[in-house]
Each structure stands twice: as structure tokens, then as C-alpha cells.
Image (cartoon, rainbow, N blue to C red):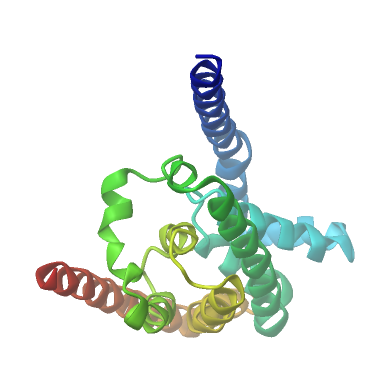
Amino acid sequence: MSKELSSKQKKILYGICIALFFLLMVAICWFAGKPLVKFASEPEKFRSWLDSLGIWGRVVFVGIIILQVFIAFIPGEPFEIGAGYAFGPIEGTLLCLVGALIGSFIVFSFVRRFGVQAVEVFFSREKIESVKFLKDAKRRDLLIFIVFFIPGTPKDLLTYFAGLTGIKLSKFLLLSTIARLPSVITSAVGGDAIGVKNYVFAIIVFAVTAILSAVGIWIYIRISKKHEDNI
């Protein structure tokens, strides 16, 4: 009886911890994430702020990207554009990739530790089920690479979901980091073009990226639907 009571107490405590964690994430999104996205959407102010921090501006920016990856509600595109504007296309891309790599490591380890309940803090069970096709071990690695490679796909969802699959952490980090390159580079290049006032080139870059994103989302939906039809 005492063991059963102890088990119930653990479940209650676990539920309270998940609820508190959810409230903490909402608070961070509201008080930190929302202002950061708005700030990053004003490139000149964003660059001036980072420049005022000196070398620590790079460290702070990487921390922002880690926070963005971990708190899946915060969009990453404004920060990638801001990185290109503030640091240039090469350094901006590298800083984004470093932050994404560390953030993905934290998310993956977090999900491996706490399981599907940790993912449900951010996503509904329906959304989790929508990427169930990644559990197919034979095609999983290729599909992860494709989905991270295509602009516009729900990478934050997939970063969390990957921790529920059997893929090794090292392999996931390698695949996802390499696959992120095209979308991060295009955003950083577009941000740099805005910084040097080459607005025509910036418009072309963002227009092409938008088209690729639309095509990517369509391909992602087709992959998901095709797998569901085969189940």
C-alpha cells in the first residue's frame, strides 16, 4: 500500500513539475521571447545593441538562439536575419549554427530524460502524431535530413520529436546542423543585404526563400500523408 501511495505521489509531483515548467515557458515567451522577436525585427537597433556589448555580443546572440530553439514558440527567422545584419553573412551563419547546435543538444537530452510529456508542454498530441513517420528506422535519418533541409518545415517540432525516436544524439546533431545550412545562409545573406542597403538583392533573396518555403511545406505535407496512407 505504501508503495502504491509513493507511486501516486511521484505521479502528482511529476505533474506539478510539468505544469510549473509550462507556466515558466509561457512567462519566458511573454516577458523575454516576444520583446526579443520585436527587437530582432528592428535590425539597426539590434545591431547597435549587440555592438555595444563588444565581444560579449556574440555570446549573448548565441544564448538567444539557444533560447529560441528550446522555447519552440519563438520564431527563429528574425534572429537569423538579424545575425546577417549585425555580423555579416559568414559570421552570422556560424553563430546561428552554434546556437542551434547547442539548443538542439539541450532539447534532445531534455526529451530523452522526460519523454513524451516534455514534448506535450509545447505541442499537442495531434502534432506529435503528425510526424510519427520519423519512427520508421529505415528511412528516418534521410527524412530528418530532408525535413531540416527544406525551408518552412516545422523544425522546432522535429527537434523535440527526434528525442522520442531511436536516433543517436551525435547523428541527429550532425544531420540537423548540416541540413539547416541553406535556410540559415539565405536569411543571413538577406539580413546582410539590408545592412548594406542593397534592398533589391534582399527582396530577391527573401522572395526566393518564400517560394522555396511554400514548396518545402507542400513536400513535407506530401511525405507525411504518403506515409500515413501506407500505414
Residue 115: x %, y % from top left:
49, 48
Residue 71: x %, y % from top left:
55, 48
Instruction: Tell me the residue at 89%/66% (across/down).
Output: 55
Quadrant containing the C terminus in the rendered view = bottom left
Instruction: Tell me the residue at 64%/70% (across/down).
Output: 101
Side (left or right) of 96 relative to 199: right
Q: Is residue 187 above or below residue 73?
A: below
Instruction: Tell me the residue at 55%/25% (across/down).
Output: 10
Residue 207 visible to the viewer: no
Residue 212 visible to the viewer: yes
Q: Is residue 185 above or below residue 64?
A: below
Q: Nearer the viewer, residue 44 or 190?
A: 190
Residue 224: x %, y % from top left:
22, 69
Side (left or right) of 136 relative to 82: left
Side (left or right) of 51 relative to 218: right
Outermost residue toward the front?
A: 1
Q: Nearer the viewer, residue 91 or 88?
A: 91
Q: How many marks?
A: 0
Q: Nearer the viewer, residue 80 or 222?
A: 222
Quadrant assignment, res 78: bottom right
Q: Is residue 190 above or below residue 125?
A: below
Instruction: Tell me the residue at 42%/76% (across/down).
Output: 206
